[in-house]
Image (spheres, rainbow, N blue to C red):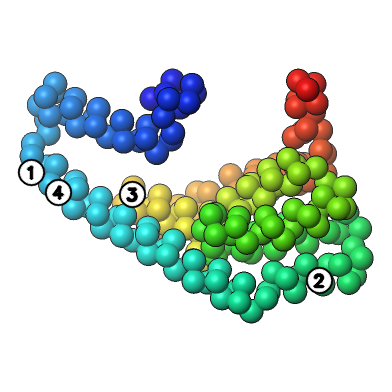
Amino acid sequence: MLSCIRFGIAAATEAGVIALVWAFVLGKFVFREYSWRHLGRSLAECCVDSALIGFLIAASVPFAWILIADGMPQQLVGLTQDYALGPAALILVVVLTLFVAGTFLDLTPASLIAAPLFLPLLTAAGFDPVQVGIIMIINLQLGGVTPPVGILVFITAQISRTPAAAVFRELTPFVAAIIVVLGLVCAIPALTLGLWSLIG
């Protein structure tokens, strides 16, 4: 599976399907510890889990539409331009905005909203587009594991049958580490562009 992902034969989602089929073949025909009844029960649990996760993602899309309809992102961009913020203050505002958006929105709709708005703004302030893209991805993923929504946490909790509060609690040191990394990526462009500059 790792080779398929590494060499572009299959995407991560397709590799997950390969793992599922391989686990079924091993459990059913090799080790003979998996019955058709177990398969039906597993499929039913999978349907429930997928429905719950899909509901969280579906709820974020109308919320994103409401934000766009009210002009909230555009107002924020206009506010930063009116105050003529410097690069440091500008990236701080963008980071905080993306973090808040990531706590409520799924990664895809949040990216579709944020990228067209903040990319021209940050590139005009002197930030490299590659660096901006990495900052956005780290930031939105960070929002996905923090309250009040934390959609990635709820997905993990649902799959592992663990209370979401316990997952949030155990994630605290990892969230702190990601915040440190995000700050370094914002402050030191060489961390994201240095290797590319050497290769290029």
Q: Which residue is mark 4?
A: 41
In this view of the protein, which residue sits in the foreground, 139 or 78?
Answer: 78
What residue is drawn where x is 74% and y is 58%? 118
Tag 1 and tag 4, C-beta contact below 8 Å: yes
Is residue 107 visible to the viewer in this orientation of the structure? yes
Q: Is residue 99 left or right of residue 126?
A: left
Whole-angstrom CA distance, mark 2 to mark 1, is 59 Å
Instruction: Look at the numbered disc 2 and give the secondary structure of its residue.
Output: helix
Q: Nearer the viewer, mark 4 or mark 2?
A: 2
Q: Which residue is mark 3?
A: 159
Tag 4 and tag 2, C-beta contact below 8 Å: no
Residue 178 at what x, y percent from top left? 65, 45
| Residue 121 figure quarter | bottom right
Instruction: Look at the numbered disc 4 and give the secondary structure of its residue.
Output: helix
Q: Which residue is mark 1?
A: 37
Q: How many other residues sit within 10 Å of disc 4, few (<14), some (14-19) or many (≥20)?
A: few
Indicate the amino acid at tag 1. Arg
Residue 122 at what x, y percent from top left? 81, 53
Whole-angstrom CA distance, mark 3 to mark 4, is 14 Å
Q: Quadrant of the C terminus?
A: top right
Residue 100 at what x, y percent from top left? 64, 64
